[in-house]
Image (cartoon, coloured by chain):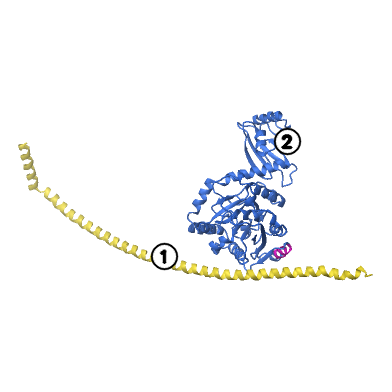
Chain colours: A yellow, B blue
Amino acid sequence: MTSPDKHKPAEQAAPKLSLVAEAVAAADAAADIIGAIDRLSLSQALLDVEIANARVLDLTARLVESNQRADGLRADLESVRSSATGVRIQADADVAAMRSEMAVHQAYLDEQRSSTAYRWAAKVWNLRNALRS
Amino acid sequence: MTRRVLVAVIVYDGKAFVPRALQSIARLATHSRTQDKSGTQDHSRTQDHSRTQDHSGTQDHSRTQDHSRTQVDVLVLDDASPDPGWSEELSALCSTLGIGYYCSPRNLGIPRNMNLALLRAEAEGYDACVLLNSDVVVPLNLVDSLAAVADTSTTIASVTAWANDVSIYSLANSQAADMLASQDRLDAVSSSLAEEFGATGIELPTGVGFCLYIPQRAIADIGLLDPVFGRGYAEEVDWCCRATAAGWHHVLAPSAFVFHMGSATNSAAGVLQKGMRTVVVNESIVDHRHPDYRDRLAEWAGRDPLAPIRARALRRLVSDAARSRGVVVDATWLYRPAPGGTAVDDRVRVVVAPDGPEAVAVAHVDGWELAMTVGPEGVLHTIAGLLGVRAEEIRLLDRGAQAGRLTVEAVAGGVPVRSLARYPERV
């Protein structure tokens, strides 16, 4: 009769082998996941970089264009300011000249009004108006 | 036909909570492997739709396809936390739990990790992907419930799970950390809500990325999340707005209830600065790209289609507890919940203001609060009608006109009354 102990080593080895096989399979599966996701991660990262670069280029172009427009608008504004300043200076000079002329005319008028002949003429005129009314 | 779903959990830090979260999430995979679902029917056929009310904004279109089985695989995406030894711990934990694990060689941020998950799901032929935070505890019915809602229409781009903390869509719980973080309790809550709501989906202006189910067909049409959102915040809002513009919509699944710790994820990942609750730059990007978004959000919030759903949910949860554990009525000005999750008395407590022109009653259990409109027949009659059970006893902790009426009602109904009031006058 065969001793039952004779079969024990083989029976004990079988569960251990299956545990080892499971561990190896799990490690392989884990490595597969890592490899697969590494590839996905890399390809997506490259795409992301392309998109990011394209966005930078686009935004840079729009920034440059905006800056150029801003420069143009500043130049236009400066030109308008200069013109306005010139017009104002000329207007001020014209006003000053007109005021001078007015002062001269006023002085002449005052001189005329203060003369003896003017005063006598004014009195005769008032008397005439009074006699008529 | 087997539905294959990839559940992807993005982890950066949060060492204290992550093991618990992963144990909860790993069950989904184990459950799907051990359960033979060939004999069960999917939710959209078994639920009694006559119980679901016609709320404005609910989705109930023709089903997409029948799936008699769901196979769930879990993948943890480690975003290369600098915490020494944490990645090794995480890897070992995932190995122990029998779930997938991948660690990025560099920190990518939340949007790019979400994209990795979606790319993996596409590459391996999954029907859908669930994007999950690592500060959650999930119920066993999570994937089935989310999938059932997604299957109600071919134009649903995302299904958001319900939770105690999910932005403006929350179902608030005052003791969430104690009550809902318990796996058994959470499973029971989600199961009750699944019975109540079935495959009903509530229309949302945008999904929330803490637990987001995305069918593969939506990704194929809309594309991935935009990495311009850096380390994260508002990336799912942008994606959802793009989807909406392309004719898709987004729904909430009240049948899938998750415990969500909250801003822990964004704080731990360094997305949010200390004291901040948002990333201003990311909000600006959303506003610039989708100028109608805030208006749509305000319109939805004003209409509040979730209000009747919340009321139904609370009534269901409180009445379930009332039926299994009983109801006691406390006439008191002050309500204090029993300390952390191991209440000596875990019955439903209906707190009634002892005085005042009208009876005001609120039922409290497990952190849930259900305000009850007391009818002319009185508090006890209202409790019986609303919760389906009689109150076991009345405890008078304070005096007043309402407490007096309650006493009269209790005596007439044969309900025992205990006077525990210590003060002769109202405080």
Q: Secondary structure at mark 1?
A: helix
In the image, is residue A96 part of the stretch drawn in magenta?
Answer: no
Q: Are marks 1 and 2 in contact (CB under 8 Å)?
A: no
Identify the disc placed on residue B31: none
The kind of residue tagged 2 is Glu
Q: Secondary structure at mark 2?
A: loop
Question: Residue reaching furthest right?
Answer: A1
Which chain is mark 2 on?
Answer: B
The image shows residue B85 at horizontal and vertical percentages of: 70, 65
The image shows residue B144 at horizontal and vertical percentages of: 65, 55
Query: Which residues make up the magenta segment?
Result: B90-96
Q: Is residue B371 above or below residue A60?
A: above
Which chain is mark 1 on?
Answer: A
- Please tell me which residue lies in front, B86 or B5: B5
- Please tell me which residue lies in front, B7 or B393: B7
Q: Is residue B314 above or below residue B380?
A: below
Q: Is residue A3 above or below residue B5?
A: below
- Please tell me which residue lies in front, B251 or A96: B251
Near mark 1 (Cα within 10 A), the count class, few <14, some 14-19 or many ≥20, is: few
Residue B244 showing in the rendered view: yes
Residue appearing at x 66%, y 68% in the figure: A33
Kindly identify which residue carries mark 1. Answer: A66
Kindly identify which residue carries mark 2. Answer: B392
Q: Quadrant of the C terminus of chain B?
A: top right
On the picture, is B206 further left or further right than B344?
left
Residue B17 showing in the rendered view: no
C-alpha separation, residue under disc 1 versus residue under disc 2: 76 Å
